[in-house]
Amino acid sequence: MTEPTKKTSKPKQIKKVELKTKKTDEDVMAFIDKLEDEKKRDESRIMLDIMKELSGSEPKLWGGSIIGFGDIQYTYSTGRQGDWFKLGFSPRKAQHSIYIMSGFNGIEDELSRLGTHKLGKGCLYVKSLEKIDLDVLKEIISKSLKSVENNNAILAGC
């Protein structure tokens, strides 16, 4: 009688995700200065100041239109890994897309006090900073940063 062959499994390799949107060395202020709408430029500078202060990180341009702060490496449940920012925004033509990497669970009170906004998977959409309470936005950003730093990011796109 022959002995059964023992199957050995190879250790699972972790694949790094190659995202299309990557951190660049482009000048963030030059990007903001090129925005056509003066109000959008002014509001982007305000967002820049808020996020820089709260994150303690310098802004970096991701892709061609997202301003991100801080770096995180994340791992999906499948084992795939990738790099992203802790906090960010994009001054899109119709509205600002504010990346809230922790998602929106646990900040329902803040959202009810924020002012006019819409929600996506991981983005808060704001047409004008004049229509929201910036102190409440700071609360939301601070909670998101704390959650992300405790490895509780959902990393959903907008």
Image (tube, helix red, strand yellow):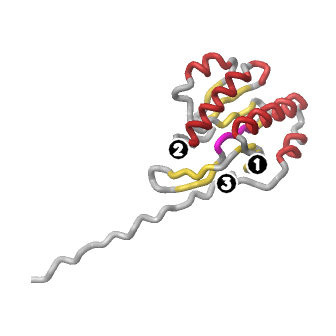
Q: Is residue 108 left or right of residue 88?
A: left
Q: What's the amino acid at mark 2?
A: Asn
For mark 1, give the secondary structure: strand
Which percent across, then down, holds residue 156? 57, 41
For the point 57% across and 57% down, which residue is it?
Answer: 17
Residue bearing the label numbered 1: 60
Pointer 3 with pointer 2, Cβ within 8 A: no
For mark 3, give the secondary structure: loop
Q: Which corner quadrant of the image does residue 127 belong to?
A: top right
Magenta-colored stretch includes residue 67: no
For the point 69% across and 26% down, which residue is it?
Answer: 137
Q: What's the amino acid at mark 1?
A: Lys
For marks 2 and 1 on the same chain, the one whose residue lies earlier in the sequence? 1
Q: Nearer the viewer, mark 3 or mark 1?
A: 1
The stretch in magenta equals: 86-90
For marks 3 and 1 on the same chain, the one whose residue lies earlier in the sequence? 3
For the point 70% across and 34% down, which residue is it?
Answer: 97
Residue bearing the label numbered 2: 151
- Which quarter of the figure is the C terminus placed in? top right
Q: Which corner quadrant of the image does residue 90 belong to?
A: top right
Nearest to the observer: residue 2 or residue 43: 43
For mark 2, give the secondary structure: loop
Residue bearing the label numbered 3: 20
For marks 3 and 2 on the same chain, the one whose residue lies earlier in the sequence? 3
Which percent across, then down, holds residue 157? 61, 41
User: Callout 3: few (<14), some (14-19), or many (20+) C-alpha neighbours within 10 Å?
Assistant: few
